[in-house]
Amino acid sequence: MPDSRGAPTVRVALVAEDAAREQGLRRLLEGAGIEVVVETSVDGFQADEVRARDADVLLVNLSRSTGLSVEQLEALVENAPVPILFNEGGGPAGSAWAQRLMGKLNALVRAARAEGATPRHGPAPGAPAPAAPPAEPETPEDPARIVVLGASLGGPQALKQFLGHLPADLPVCFILAQHIGESFLSLFVEQLDRVTPLRVAQARAGMRPAPGLVLVVPVEGRFELDPGGAIGFGPTPERRPFNPCIDEVMTAVAARFGARAQAIVFSGMGSDGAEGVRRIAERGGAVWAQDAASCVISGMPDAARRTGVVRTSASPARLAEKLTREVQGDAPASGAV
């Protein structure tokens, strides 16, 4: 149904953590001319209901101290049949927060309609199968760069895009810290290995960074590097909100590799990585981040940008293209994309 100006009404499926906040947000949306066609919780979410009600967008409203796990939220992202927007926190109607939220919703729906409701996740039907990963390098040559990839909610989708755009012969070692449950780690490694020509493996004690490797940091243990560059794991700190800790990984890589270290922060809630990117920058390494427009939720990249050390912000595919150009051309990690 069009609104009074003749534009199609935006139809929202609303997911919220508690009933009181959900009702307040519903009133705000309806006051802005947006139709709420589904109201549910994360546990009660059903993709078929969202399809049946012909929703345009899934709006997930989270508290800043959400008790939901990364796995619960990633499952929501994977199963959403329409574009999804995460909102962290909230504010009263008429506030700058409310105006930004309405703007994001309308922009997301306009983009989806312009693209003919192209699915946001997964390969296109009939897409060629990814190339088989190359064999493990026979010699542990030093990589041109050691790039720490930090990600949380929305990270798996962004990382697949990023790694899928890299060539097999790139002389870079990636150390990936993704907030994820221990039981999902093996499946996550397998999924990444299928979409990139690089070799993806779980990081284990004694391994050394080598070109063409993506080493996924396990959930348990504090990531460490000895003076020779070999990976090790110390005791896990008692108080640590996320596992693995991106700040810890970036700090260890910065201390060992200096200006050869680089950090890229992808989609995620919170601020893990903000301290780590400072350590990378202090040692002369480059810091990049996924742009807010391409994130499922931009809390982590935004926190990194607030440090003032992020030189480049772009989509995962553009970041991969820029890295390839710079490494193959031996160019500095400049801000231009």
Image (cartoon, rainbow, N blue to C red):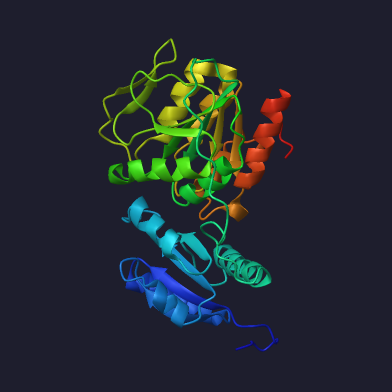
The residue lying toward the viewer, choosing from 220 and 61, is: 220
Q: Residue at x 41, y 32 (%)?
A: 201
Res. 299 in view: yes
Q: Residue at x 34, y 70 (%)?
A: 41
- Name, please, the residue furthest toward the top: 228
Q: Residue at x 59, y 19 (%)?
A: 259
Q: Residue at x 52, y 25 (%)?
A: 279
The residue lying toward the viewer, choosing from 130 and 301, is: 130
In the rendered image, residue 49, in percent from the top left (x then y), is placed at 40, 78
Quarter holding the C terminus?
top right
Depicted 315 relative to depicted 96: above or below: above
Q: Which quarter of the figure has residue 325?
A: top right
Quarter holding the N terminus?
bottom right
Res. 271 in view: no
Q: Which quarter of the figure has residue 98?
A: bottom right
The residue lying toward the viewer, choosing from 239 and 80, is: 80
Depicted 30 relative to depicted 99: above or below: below
The residue lying toward the viewer, choosing from 213 and 100, is: 213
In the rendered image, residue 97, in percent from the top left (x then y), is placed at 55, 63
Depicted 38 relative to depicted 135: above or below: below
